[in-house]
Structure formats: C-alpha cells, structure tokens
Image (cartoon, rainbow, N blue to C red):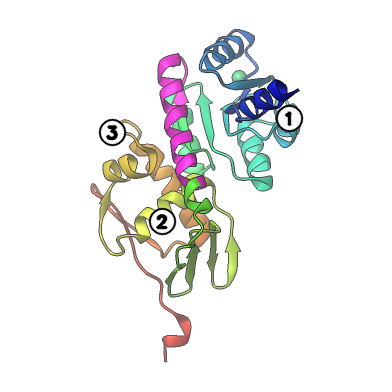
C-alpha cells in the first residue's frame, strides 16, 4: 500500500495536456504522435463543436487549432473556449493570406503556423507558449501579491491577472495580458515588435512580428483605441490614459 501511495504521488505530477483540433486525419495523427512523444497528454478532435465540449472537460494547457473545420470554424472555437477559460491557442492556417486575415480580425490566438509546417517547429512554438504560461502561473502563485498597476482609468492586477478599464472588467487572453504588462512596464517608450516578440513570446527571431500586430489589434478592440500608439516602421508605445476625475 505504501508503495502505491508513493507511486500515486509521483504519478500525480500533472502532464501537459494538449488538445489537437484538426479534421485532416493524416495531419491530426502525425501531430498527436509527435506531441505524445514529448510526454504530453494529447487528445484529438476532428470538428469544432466536439472541440469546445472536450476542452471543457479535458482542460488543456494549450490548444493546436486548425482554422477550417466542419461545423463551427477555428475562430468560433477559439472564441467559445476562451470565453470559458483563458487558454493559449496556436492556430493552423492553410495559407499565409489566411493568417493575415485572422490577424486583421484580431482573433484571440496566441500564435499561428501555416501548413505545411515542421513538427519540430510546432513543438518549439508550443514549448515557448507553455513557458510563458508557466511564468504567468508562478507569478500569480506568489504569496506576496504585487501591487496593481494603475494608470488613469486602467488597472492591472498582476496577481489576480485581472484588468479593468473605467471600472469595467476586460477579459484578455494570457498572451494579451502579458503584452499589456510588457507595454505598461515602459509607458510612452516605443518597443519594437522584435523586442516584444522576444519578451512576451520568448522568440529570438523576428519571423512572427505579425503575431505582435494581431495582439495589439485585439488589445485595442478590448481596451479602446487610444491606449496603444503605433510608431510606423518601429513598434508600439503605451500612452497612459487620463484619470477622468483629475480633469477640470
Ligand atoms: Ca481543416
């Protein structure tokens, strides 16, 4: 019995859970096998509605999500899953212009890869996403809570990972939250896309700078257009909002 309980303790270390949503069986199987080889707990869904259902019970740490799916598409899956619980999403697209379209929409995905993609790169990107999440979890688990960042009518509670603007709670995805915190750490300072990519996404290469644009777009949609200034050809800067009561 003693051995059993020791083994249970060891076995209770949670494995990383990955949900793969992909309707092409060959790709789904290949991805699932590769991710299982990392020691991750992988579940596969072949359509959008099932994915939303499975995500609720499986509680994945990260989702690999194809855009074109039978039933509801990847965008809708992303919206529905994240409305229930913030979870990082890596979206698979068929073409570069599809990625551009999604970025234009400011979909709440954390990263994008265009098919065909290298499995090795997929694993690397997922690990970067998980590192970022691990960082967030340990930050929120810190016993001495950090004081909230207050900038005018914008309040960021880092320990609770909550954001309010004009006293209204704003729901951000994990990556949107990290990006906002990075911008707030240096208000009025122009941060290049490359720097933000390295800081928020843990990427050294600049190939994903459009991902930064996508998340800035999402933050503007959720927090208002006045907060983040684009410096064309350079990057972004946070403009601290005014405190309405301070104005005469
Ligand atoms: Ca598909």
Question: Disc 1 on helix, strand or loop?
Answer: helix
Residue 50 in percent (x, y) is at 75, 27
Q: Would you say the residues marked 1 and 2 are in contact, meaning their CB atoms lie under 8 Å apart?
A: no
Question: Disc 3 on helix, strand or loop?
Answer: loop
Please, is residue 238 above or below residue 233 in the view? below
Please, is residue 61 above or below residue 222 in the view? above
The residue indicated by pointer 2 is: 181
Residue at x 70%, y 31% (from the top left corner): 58
Query: Which residue lies most toward the bottom here?
Result: 248
Q: CA distance from mark 2 to mark 3?
A: 19 Å
The residue indicated by pointer 1 is: 54
Q: CA distance from mark 1 to mark 2?
A: 31 Å
Q: Which corner quadrant holds the C terminus?
A: bottom left
Q: Is residue 168 left or right of residue 147?
A: right
Binning the other alpha carbons within 10 Å of mark 1 as few (below 14), some (14 to 19) or many (20 upward) gives some
Per the rendering, the mark at residue 204 is 3
Binning the other alpha carbons within 10 Å of mark 2 as few (below 14), some (14 to 19) or many (20 upward) gives some
Query: Which residue lies most toward the front here?
Result: 2
Is residue 66 among the parts visible in the rendering? no
């Amino acid at each position: 019995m003693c051995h059993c309980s020791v083994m249970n303790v060891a076995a209770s270390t949670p494995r990383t859970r990955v949900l793969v949503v992909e309707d092409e069986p060959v790709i789904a199987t290949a991805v699932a096998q590769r991710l299982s080889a990392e020691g991750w707990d992988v579940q596969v869904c072949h359509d959008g509605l099932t994915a939303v259902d499975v995500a609720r019970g499986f509680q994945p740490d990260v989702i690999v999500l194809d855009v074109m799916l039978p039933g509801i598409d990847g965008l809708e899956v992303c919206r529905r899953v994240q409305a229930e619980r913030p979870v990082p999403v890596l979206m698979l697209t068929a073409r570069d212009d599809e990625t551009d379209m999604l970025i234009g929409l400011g979909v709440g995905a954390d990263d994008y890869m265009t098919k065909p993609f290298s499995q090795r790169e997929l694993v690397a990107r997922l690990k970067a996403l998980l590192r970022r999440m691990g960082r967030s979890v340990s930050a929120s688990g810190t016993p001495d809570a950090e004081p909230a960042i207050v900038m005018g009518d914008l309040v960021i509670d880092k320990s609770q990972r909550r954001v309010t603007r004009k006293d209204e709670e704003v729901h951000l995805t994990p990556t949107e939250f990290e990006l906002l915190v990075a911008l707030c750490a240096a208000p009025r300072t122009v941060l290049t896309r490359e720097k933000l990519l390295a800081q928020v996404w843990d990427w050294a290469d600049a190939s994903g700078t459009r991902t930064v644009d996508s998340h800035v777009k999402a933050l503007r949609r959720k927090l208002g257009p006045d907060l983040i200034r684009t410096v064309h050809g350079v990057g972004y800067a946070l403009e601290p909002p005014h405190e309405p009561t301070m104005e005469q």
